[in-house]
Image: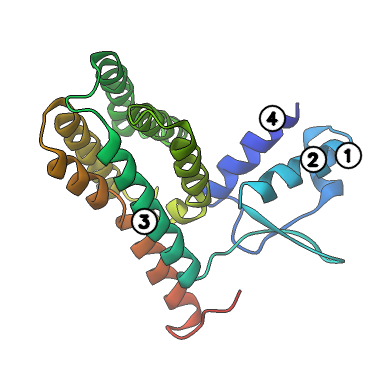
Amino acid sequence: MRADVVQQLEEEIVFGILHSKEKLVEEDLAARFNEKRHVIRDVLEDLHAAGLITRIPNRGAFVRELTPTEVTEIYEVREVMEVAAAMRTPLPAPEPILTKMREIQNRHSAAIAAGDLRAVFYLNIEFHQAQYSACNNSKLVEIIVDCAKQAHLIRAVKYADPGHLKKVERDHLAILAAMSGTDRQALIEVVKAHLPDSPNAYIRAYEQRYGTRHDSV
């Protein structure tokens, strides 16, 4: 099914199996997934809409490579939107949301311990969707989710680092603690602190590959 193919390719991009600038050939994908060409074209359109690939006329589809400027801009927007959500979140947050977040985080921690990166990836998304649902602004949540999807390309460089995953786990627990209390500034600070590691690592890797002054699309 189309959704299954999109999910599989998204995972391969996130985990670095498909590399930046790698070409996605319709014929090859159709054979691999035993799908019609028109289904694969729709899959590529979905990945393009999510910001994960680039489509170049007369050349084809390629895994997108973000420049340091694009990475910085994505995370500037993420910080603004996620802080806005934190400011709108009632404190303490509703207990049903906190209970759901705790249950998700228990599974997330178990997945980190087991080295199950696929589960870590999806449980991280689930945790934050529950977190931002507390802000009671569906449009704001949509923007946050869209920006987070663009960050999938950035996260790939950190998923092999167990130290990073343990920091993510600690941050999630700190977010839960802040949402369980009444100190709004504490929640804002932990939301902001949760963002920087992946983009910094991505930019360092990019500059090592191209040199510090290279910033072309």
Q: Which amino acid lies under the numbered mark 1 shown in the image of this protein?
A: His
Above or below: residue 146 compared with residue 178: below
Left/right placement of residue 65 relative to residue 25 reads: left
Q: Give the distance between the C-alpha atoms of the residues marked 4 and 1, in whole angstroms.
A: 14 Å
Q: Residues within 10 Å of mark 4 (few under 14, many from 20)?
A: few
Cα separation, mark 4 vs mark 3, equals: 27 Å
Question: CB atoms at circles 1 and 2 under 8 Å apart?
Answer: yes
- Residue sitting farthest toward the bottom: 213
The residue singled out by tag 1 in the image is 38
Q: Position of residue 86 (x, y in %)?
A: 27, 39
The tag on residue 42 is: 2
Report if residue 211 is visible in the image: yes
- Between 82 and 194, the residue placed more toward the observer is 82
Residue density around tag 1, few if under 14, some if 14–19, many if 20 or more, within 10 Å = few
Mark 2: amino acid: Asp
Marks 2 & 3, CB-CB < 8 Å contact:
no
User: Three-letter amino acid code at disc 3?
Assistant: Ser
Labels 4 and 1: the sequence-earlier one: 4
Instruction: Indicate the position of residue 51 as horizontal and vertical percent values.
Output: 61, 52
Instruction: Identify residue for label 3.
Output: 198
Asked if labels 3 and 4 touch by Cβ distance under 8 angstroms, the answer is no
